[in-house]
Image (spheres, helix red, strand yellow):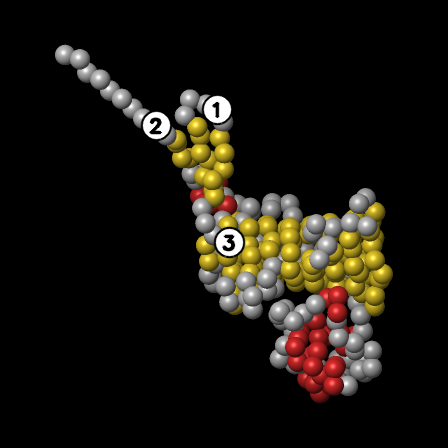
Amino acid sequence: MCHLMVTLILFIINIPPLLALDKTGIVVNIQGKVLREPVQKKKTIKKLFSNESFMATESEEELKLGEEIFFGDKIRTEEKSLLKIKMNHNTMLTLGPKSKMEIKSEETNLHSGILRTLIPHGNLDKIKLTTPHAAMGIRGTEFITQVKEGKTIVALLTGSLDINQGGENRELLKKHSIQISQKGFGELKPLSDALVFLLLKNSIDDNLDLENLPPTETKPELTNNEPQLRKSFRPKNWQEILNENQQE
């Protein structure tokens, strides 16, 4: 008797075990629609009778409140959306509308859009944030970074920030902003106390543009002894701030 066995194998899919994934944070606030290309859904596909392999990524999934974030996750927000992540080392990342970032083991990459970073004082870990135009080493500070139209704009609210662009290093001091491109560093601009307070107290929305911040030089400086004045500097959103300054 002749037996014929034919085995056809097209490919072998090897899904990395979840235990091998490195959790880096958790979603603590989410508004609108936020999508993730999760690292845990990447599959290694091996060709038959060959050592060659390639990566196949499943479609994006929508992030939900309370979900864990892993090293390698790529995240993007849609219009009128916002994502807040609490990292393992207590750093808080807030990704604004129409933004894209990737979280790696040694750094966070902001590809486009706007990101608020808060690193608590006393945190001994030096966090690294990179954009297409600069790399930033940060510790114990709060700042906002925006990537748009071939440039990176950084507004430092508290602490200090080391920025590297093309091998040149600069230290950005609090209450200042700077623009960086492939050509180098732009002009250093001071931020008034009133404007810093606005940036600290107001969330990131579609109208916030670090390149065109509303002028606040004519407004009085803020101190801890002026609670009523502080209350008056608490508009609902950045469109209201812009409208107020246009009417002045």
**Residue positioned 77% across, 53% down in the render:** 181
Farthest residue in the left direction? Answer: 1
Q: Nearer the viewer, residue 151 or 197?
A: 151
Residue hosting label 3: 36
Give the residue furthest to the top.
1
Quarter of the image that includes the C terminus: bottom right
First in sequence, mark 1 or 3: give its number: 3
Residue that label 2 marks? 9
Secondary element at tag 1: loop
Give the distance between the C-alpha atoms of the residues marked 1 and 3, in whole angstroms.
Answer: 30 Å
Q: Residue at x 45, y 49 (%)?
A: 59
**Quadrant of the rendered image containing residue 219:** bottom right
Asked if disc 3 and disc 2 are in contact, CB closer than 8 Å, the reply is no
CB under 8 Å between callouts 1 and 3?
A: no
Residue 188 position, x and y percent, is 84, 62
Residue denoted by label 1: 51
